[in-house]
Amino acid sequence: MILLLEIKKLKRTGCLPAFLGGAVLAAAFPLLNMLVRSETFTALPGEPFRILTDANWQMMAMLNILTIICGACMIYHTEYANNGAQKMAVLPVRTYQIFWGKFAVTVLALAGMLLFEIAALELCAMHWFPDYHLQLTALAKNLCFSLIAALPTIILMMLIASVCQNMWISLGIGVILVFTVSVFPKENLFLSLCPFNSPYQTLALAAQNGSEWIFTLICAAETIIFGIAAFIFDNVRRYFL
Amino acid sequence: MNFMSLIGVELTKLRRSKIILILLAPVIMMWIPSIVNAEIHFDPQGISITPEYNFFIQGFMGMAWFMIPASLVICTVLLVQTERSHKGLLKMLSLPLGSAKFCLAKFIILLLLAALQMVLSIGTYYLSSAIVSQLWNYNFILEPLYVIPEVLKIYVSAIPLAAVLWMFATLIQAPVFSVGLGLASLVPSVLIINTKFWFLYPMSYPFYLLMIAYGKAAKGIFETEIAWLPWLPTAALITVTALAVSCIRFGASERR
């Protein structure tokens, strides 16, 4: 019910086309890379899918994060622009349900994006590496891993967007966080688990370090912690906003 | 009402926007890893560069590549959204003044905010290089006659980019598209800077100038001379076109 309502609210904000646009742009990266300089990649040893993600995933994940930031800011901007949030507060719904509805919409949108992007990577692998065959289980595993790795980023960004009523403040905080993690070193396991940094991780890289289960569990735990924080904030916000 | 007082009015509107905090935060953030991991500047990994130049270039790298364009995007959102709430733009358009003047005044504010961020980044550069010099007993501080012109060059090269982003903000009504387009367009600038057509892409100009500075400080990394000829006319053309389009279309949806 609340989920359908939240999807309906996005109808004329352009959010869903924006998510689609982000997915298309991100999927264009491996395609362009292979069209322009396929020899450099086909000559590399190793598993084709791994070669492609190593070459392209940084840019694709960054586009995903930027799309999440844009989407989260916009989804809450529709509430704050004409005092919609105040009107929702007098309706017989719990306000934290609205948060979960918006979170679920963003997760679904991101799942769609990831599916599109991973399919694009897969198609590139099948087209340029003749002896590569489609493995559906590996594809599903990659999809789930990338989605779980992105969950802390999504929920933290939703929390920021729900706190700040002005869109430029939430956008600014999101962009500053992206910038901050980009200047810190990438190799550190602790830093790579932070929200806004975890989506850059790929399943192959985590499996190589043997940390894929720890990574998944900690990302899930972070999501729960930020979810509890959002719940608490929702109950106390009327005291200071 | 002359142009200067219009700019004064626009500045007054920003009074309680907290934008200075948003401009200041990344400027501080960009130096923290450099201070914490200062010893990496002594190990140039095969590149012939002195530690003090390495410190300066590495610190400004993220700034020129990502944060200057992203800050400009945030500022355009600020400038547009303060007018959207309570129909501010509609009230402005009903005044007996040309809408192009409003548009240019807001663009000047955008440039002023970017200039403020550059001044803040120079200030934090000197602060952090002083801290690192104290910690490591090595002079990391470069003279202002080098630092200020370099940062000024990066700033001036961001003007075409600001004009293009301002055009996006005035042309595209849905904020998600103007913001998304701005943010998405800065991701591939690292790739485009290595192609022949970098001068057509305003998002890569600040990064190009920083790479020229890198090339001068460390031989063989990048070109050392700025390729003025195709660049300068193209950049001027892009700026003028973008400003003209945004002046013509400013407030178009409100005027319907």
Image: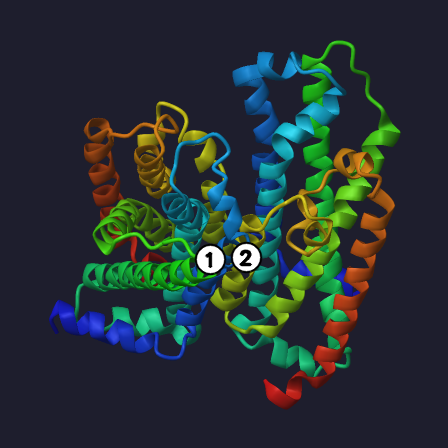
Measuring from the top left, give residue A196's x and y in whole percent.
64, 53
Answer with left or right where residue A48 lies relative to residue B28. right
Q: Residue at x 48, y 30 (%)?
A: B46
Q: Front-most of B59 and A54?
A: B59
Q: Is residue B63 above or below residue A157?
A: above
Residue position for label 1? B31
Answer with left or right where residue B157 lies relative to residue A136. left
Q: Is residue B68 above or below residue B96?
A: above
- Disc 2 residue type? Val
Q: Tell me the SS state at disc 2.
A: helix
Residue position for label 2? B36
Q: Residue at x 67, y 13 (%)?
A: A128
- Disc 1 residue type? Trp
Residue farthest to the top? A130
Q: Chain of mark 1?
A: B
Q: Front-most of B203 and B131?
A: B131
- Residue B131 tag number: none
Both on one chain, marks 2 and 1? yes
Q: Front-most of A33 and B94?
A: A33
Q: Is residue A50 above or below residue B166?
A: above
Q: Would you identify the image quadrant in which residue B24 lies?
A: bottom left
